[in-house]
Amino acid sequence: MDTNELKFLLKLLGCENYRSSLSGNVFKSFKGKNTICEKLGDRDIIDYSREIASVKILPPGQALLKLDAAEIPIEDKELKILENVGKASGKVAPSKIKFSLKAAEKEEILKSLDSRGLIEAEIKLKKTKAEVWLTERGIEFLRDDFVPKKGANPTISLDLLNNYLRFLRKTLQMKSEQPGITTESTVEITNITDEEILQIILKLDKELGTENYLPIFHLRQKLQPPLSRDELDKALYRLQADDKIDLGTLQEASAYTPEQIDTGIVQNAGGRLFYISVE
C-alpha cells in the first residue's frame, strides 16, 4: 500500500461509519482518488458506488435482433434498448442510448441484458454523487494486518494519526467484548447447515417485518462472513430445490441502492434473484 492509499484510508476513518461522499469536503481535493478507489476496491478493503460506464452488443444480442418479432423472448423496452446498443459502432455510454426511460430503469435493463449475455457492460465508479466506505475486510486489515512501509513521502498529519488511533481503540474494544472464539467453534460457524440458514431467514423476516419477502442483502450482511457469496448462493439454491424457499426477481429497483441491488443472484436469463420467501 502506497502513502496516498494510506492517507485516503486514514481520511475515511475520520468519517461517520467510515463512509463518505467522494465529492464532499473530505475528498474534494484529494488527487488520484478515483484510481485509489479502484485499487483498494479490487482488494476488498473499501467499496464504492458503481454504475455502468459503457456497453456493447455481443453476438447473441445481434442474433436476437435478427429474429422475427413474434420470436423475440424479451420485453419491448429491453428490445428498444438492445436495438440502440446494436446501432453503436463499439462501446456506448448509457447516457447516449436514446430512449425515454429514467436513468435507474435504463441501468436495470442494461444489467439484465448483460446478465443474459446479450451485451457486455463495463462497470466503473459512479461519476456523480459517488460514495466510498470501508468494508468488513478493510476493518480487519487496518485493525489486525496493516504494517506501514517506508514510502516516498511517508509523513502523515496528526489529524490522520488521531483518526487511526480512535479507530483502533473502538474496534479493539468491540473485538475484546466479543465472546472468545475457539478454532472448533470457528469451524462450526463456517459449516453452517442449510436448516440453520432457513431459521436465520425466518428470524430476519420477523425482525425486519418484510412479510415473507426478505431482500437478499439482509441475509448476506448476516452470513458473509463466515460464508462466501458463492457458498451462500449454493445453499439458497439447495433450499429452493428442496421446496423450503422461493427466490423471486427484483421488482422495484428504485426502492434500493445500487449496492443492495448488486447483492442479488445473477441469472443467465431474467432479472436478479433478490427476494427470499419461505414456503
Image (tube, rainbow, N blue to C red):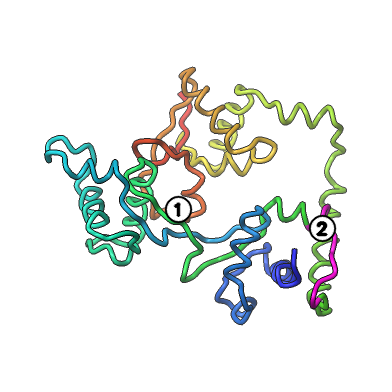
Q: Looking at the rendered structure, which numbered label has been put on residue 146?
A: 2
Identify residue type, mark 1: Tyr
Residue 23: where, in percent of width, then height?
Answer: 55, 76
Could you tell me which residue is drawn at 59 percent across and 68 percent down? 35
Residue 103: where, in percent of width, then height?
Answer: 34, 62
Residue 195: where, in percent of width, then height?
Answer: 61, 22
Distance of mark 2 from mark 1, alpha carbons?
34 Å
Q: Nearer the viewer, residue 17 or 39?
A: 39
Q: Nearer the viewer, residue 180 or 52?
A: 52
Element type at marker 1?
A: loop
Q: Nearer the viewer, residue 243 or 66?
A: 66
The answer to whether 94 appears left or right of 209 in the picture is left
Identify residue type, mark 2: Phe
Question: In which quadrant of the rendered image does the N terminus lie?
Answer: bottom right
Q: Which residues are magenta?
A: 142-153
Marks 2 and 1 close (CB-CB < 8 Å): no
Count residues near mark 2 (Cα–Cα under 10 Å), then give few for <14, some for 14-19, many for 20+.
Answer: few
The answer to whether 93 appears left or right of 256 in the picture is left
